[in-house]
């Protein structure tokens, strides 16, 4: 999911009849009410964590807490490949984050963690693309490598995906070179195919990456996403496609174009969304997670995707401390929370849940899930969806 991941790291001419977002927030009432009921009973949100499918349509049909396959099942396969997406469904993910959307030179949307693809493909081994290696300023950060916007779709299709963090996931390198880079339109067709095969609706949760950066290049993301969703009949309030971005103004644009549920991603408290930097808005994420900031977000979005640290901070040693009021405050504003990212490996876990020192060794991830679920979050992104499903089962059963 994210450049800002603290654990890693033309408006539409056809305005949506759902503009403003007010009516669309109504479908979140069931999940929020369940969470509030759990708090009232002193269960820290456990009433909202039934794991059952709540009554209703659209996002209300998803289990709570929702298990979201982060870039697929990226703990087991190279991220943002059909191998990763497919496995996420096989392992029980309720929703698949397919994918992080970036454009090609000829205007197609493809699924990569970042526009720089040197670390997630075999592009460096292609001599015909050696002269494409360059250095760019990406959201204020000097970045060297190969960028999707410098390739046509046909050229990108000659590349194959590889594991992004091999030190933590050496076994995933077995699958390097097996899958190509998927387009967003291919993902939408795959979603329909999987829905038919599995006999139940498959949900996806794509992210728009660096929309301000690409808008300045004339490669507007929001319009392209909206166009494809309309083409495939997936631009309504009950459509099984949740859209997310780290840039609030991008979500505001989408709110005027489509009826889909929308989520504002939130990085570290002291950071500023890049669109705020570009426009001179002095606010930080800390301002956005105040009660006032959350009420503002609720005017155009249905949820937030905060870092786990915004839900439960860590101390100087990396141990979990006392939860913040973010869950309660967001629910009071009518917003759902889908924090990121749960991973089994030690380096990504709070210090008090680690076991051993191996960079690829698993820690007490079930204990960490229990601590986060107890806050009343509505779902979580995870690289290992099967672990998330088991952790939800434990939590619901009081294990």
Image (cartoon, helix red, strand yellow):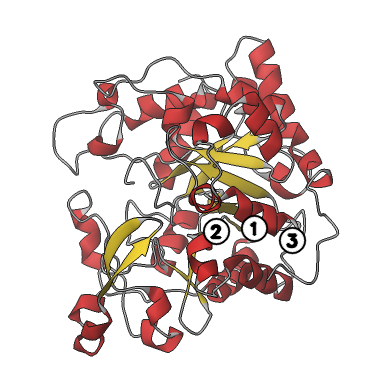
Q: Position of residue 394 (x, y in %)?
A: 47, 27
Q: Which residue is mark 3?
A: 258
Do the residues under discs 3 and 2 have CB atoms within 8 angstroms? no
Mark 2 neighbour density, 10 Å: few (under 14) some (14–19) many (20 or more) = many
Mark 1 neighbour density, 10 Å: few (under 14) some (14–19) many (20 or more) = many
For residue 168, above or below residue 174: above
Left/right placement of residue 321 relative to residue 194 reads: left
Do the residues under discs 1 and 2 have CB atoms within 8 angstroms? yes
Q: Position of residue 111 (x, y in %)?
A: 46, 68
Q: Position of residue 50 (x, y in %)?
A: 62, 29
Q: Nearer the viewer, mark 1 or mark 3?
A: 3
- Which one is earlier in the sequence, the residue at label 1 or at label 2? 2
Q: Residue at x 49, y 48 (%)?
A: 277
Left/right placement of residue 316 relative to residue 68 reads: left
Do we see residue 53 in this rendering? no
SS assignment at label 2: loop
Viewport quadrant of the C terminus: top left
Q: Which residue is mark 2?
A: 206
Q: Nearer the viewer, residue 137 or 239?
A: 137
Q: Position of residue 51 (x, y in %)?
A: 60, 34
Q: Which residue is mark 1?
A: 241
- Which one is earlier in the sequence, the residue at label 3 or at label 2? 2
**Residue situated furthest top in the rendering:** 42
Q: Tell me how far mark 1 sits from mark 3, CA to CA.
A: 11 Å
For residue 150, above or below residue 56: below
Q: In the image, which disc is placed on residue 347?
A: none
In the rendered image, which quarter is residue 348 located in? top left
Do we see residue 324 in this rendering? yes
Mark 3 neighbour density, 10 Å: few (under 14) some (14–19) many (20 or more) = many
Q: Tell me how far mark 3 sits from mark 2, CA to CA.
A: 14 Å
SS assignment at label 1: loop
């Amino acid at each position: 999911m994210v450049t800002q991941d603290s654990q890693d790291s033309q408006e539409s001419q056809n305005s949506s009849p759902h503009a403003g977002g007010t009516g669309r927030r109504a479908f979140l009432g069931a999940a929020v009410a369940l969470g509030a009921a759990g708090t009232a009973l002193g269960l820290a949100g456990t009433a909202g964590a039934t794991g059952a499918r709540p009554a209703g349509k659209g996002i209300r049909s998803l289990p709570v807490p929702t298990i979201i396959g982060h870039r697929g099942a990226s703990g087991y396969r190279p991220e943002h490949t059909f191998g990763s997406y497919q496995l996420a469904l096989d392992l029980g993910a309720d929703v698949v984050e397919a994918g992080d959307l970036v454009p090609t030179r000829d205007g197609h949307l493809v699924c990569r963690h970042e526009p720089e693809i040197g670390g997630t493909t075999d592009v460096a081994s292609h001599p015909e693309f050696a002269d494409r290696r360059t250095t760019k300023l990406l959201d204020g950060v000097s970045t060297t490598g190969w960028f999707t916007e410098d390739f046509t779709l046909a050229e990108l299709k000659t590349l194959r995906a590889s594991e992004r963090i091999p030190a933590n996931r050496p076994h995933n390198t077995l699958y390097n070179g097996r899958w190509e880079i998927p387009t967003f339109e291919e993902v939408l067709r795959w979603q329909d195919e999987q829905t038919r095969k599995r006999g139940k609706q498959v949900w996806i949760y794509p992210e728009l990456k660096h929309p301000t950066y690409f808008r300045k290049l004339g490669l507007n993301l929001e319009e392209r996403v909206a166009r494809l969703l309309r083409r495939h009949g997936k631009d309504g309030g009950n459509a099984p496609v949740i859209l997310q971005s780290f840039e609030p103004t991008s979500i505001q644009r989408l709110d005027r174009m489509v009826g889909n549920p929308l989520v504002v991603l939130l990085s570290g408290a002291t950071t500023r969304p890049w669109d705020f930097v570009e426009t001179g808005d002095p606010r930080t994420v800390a301002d956005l997670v105040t009660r006032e900031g959350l009420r503002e977000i609720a005017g155009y979005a249905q949820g937030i995707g905060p870092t786990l640290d915004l839900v439960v901070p860590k101390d100087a040693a990396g141990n979990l401390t006392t939860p913040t009021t973010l869950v309660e405050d967001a629910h009071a504003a009518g917003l759902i929370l889908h924090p990121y990212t749960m991973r089994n490996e030690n380096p990504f876990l709070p210090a008090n849940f680690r076991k051993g020192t191996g960079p690829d060794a698993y820690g007490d991830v079930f204990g960490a899930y229990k601590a986060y679920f107890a806050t009343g979050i509505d779902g979580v992104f995870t690289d290992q969806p099967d672990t998330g499903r088991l952790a939800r089962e434990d939590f619901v059963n009081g294990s």
